[in-house]
Image (tube, rainbow, N blue to C red):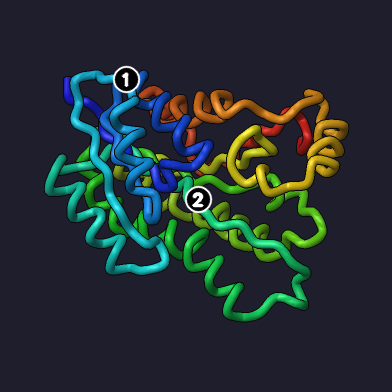
Amino acid sequence: MKTRTALVTGATGGLGKTICEKLVRAGYTVCLHTFQHMEQAHKQVESMTDNGSSHLIVQADLSKEGDIQSMFGKIQENFGSLDVLICNAGVAASGLSWKTERQHWDEVFSVNTTGSWLCSKYAIPLLRQSSGGRILYVSSIVAHRPLVGTALYAASKSALEGLTRAQAVELARFNITVNCIAPGYFEAGMISSVDESLREDIRAHTPAGRLGHPDELAEMVVSLASPESGYITGQVLHVNGGLYI
């Protein structure tokens, strides 16, 4: 049976790295996307458990359509098709909505929203060649339960959830599912920039009483990426320890 191939954008980040590792353990060949962390990506590939596949590192600035098009050209050249697209890359943003500069707004949307959409645009022709293509976007709990100063980030992630629902309807006839995961707060990624007092407040208000482990999110990703998840589409799945219900 042909080994399934998955592209993970933002593959060198805390959550992205764990997602890649889980996919490899599940038997996938992984395309690791990065923009500024090529050395880390190479080390990551060397450390991943070998399942006999040749993993691929692809570099692209997700705010530039030309880079994205070239990235998928390289994937097509190496593998011919793609089974899973996981849009995990994103940039953080903070500040009050009415004090946000237009340039900053555009910069965040260009990666978090437009970049993810463009990845899907160039991935879909490759996913149509799969027996069960999967698109997974990564949103955020702040799209549903925003904190003061998260308007820009929340808006950029909320747009992905609308895209998820629309593409699920469009792509069902090709046996491609489209889902979105909205993570809560995890012991990895952007939480590292949050003050410890705020982290403690988040823990105190989370029914699970703790931040999430990256493995817990990665397990959800692998499950939704599997061929057996073909009847789940157009959904926003929350992984947050009960913080948003």
| 196 to the left or right of 216 | right
Q: CA distance from mark 1 to mark 2?
A: 31 Å
Residue 31 x %, y %: 29, 40
Q: In the rendered image, which quarter contains the N terminus?
A: top left
Residue labelled with disc 2: 164
Amino acid type at circle 2 is Thr
In the image, is residue 216 above or below residue 165?
Answer: above
Q: In the rendered image, which quarter contains the C terminus?
A: top right
Name the residue: 52% across, 27% down: 220
Residue at the farthest bottom position: 102
Residue labelled with disc 1: 49
In the image, is residue 240 above or below residue 128?
Answer: above
Residue 176 visible in the displayed image: no
Residue 147 x %, y %: 80, 54
Out of 241 and 61, give the one closest to the viewer.
Answer: 61
The mark that comes first in sequence, 1 or 2, is: 1
Name the residue: 26% across, 20% down: 50
Residue 16 x %, y %: 47, 38
Residue 38 visible in the displayed image: yes
Out of 76 and 95, give the one closest to the viewer.
Answer: 95
Name the residue: 65% across, 32% down: 187
Amino acid type at circle 1 is Thr
Which quadrant of the structure image shows residue 156?
bottom right
Crowding around mark 2 (Cα neighbors within 10 Å: few <14, some 14 to 19, many 20+) is many
| 60 to the left or right of 187 | left
Give the structural element (helix, strand or loop) at label 2.
Answer: helix
Crowding around mark 1 (Cα neighbors within 10 Å: few <14, some 14 to 19, many 20+) is some
Residue 134 x %, y %: 37, 39
Name the residue: 86% across, 38% down: 201
Label number found at residue 9 = none
Out of 59 and 43, give the one closest to the viewer.
Answer: 43
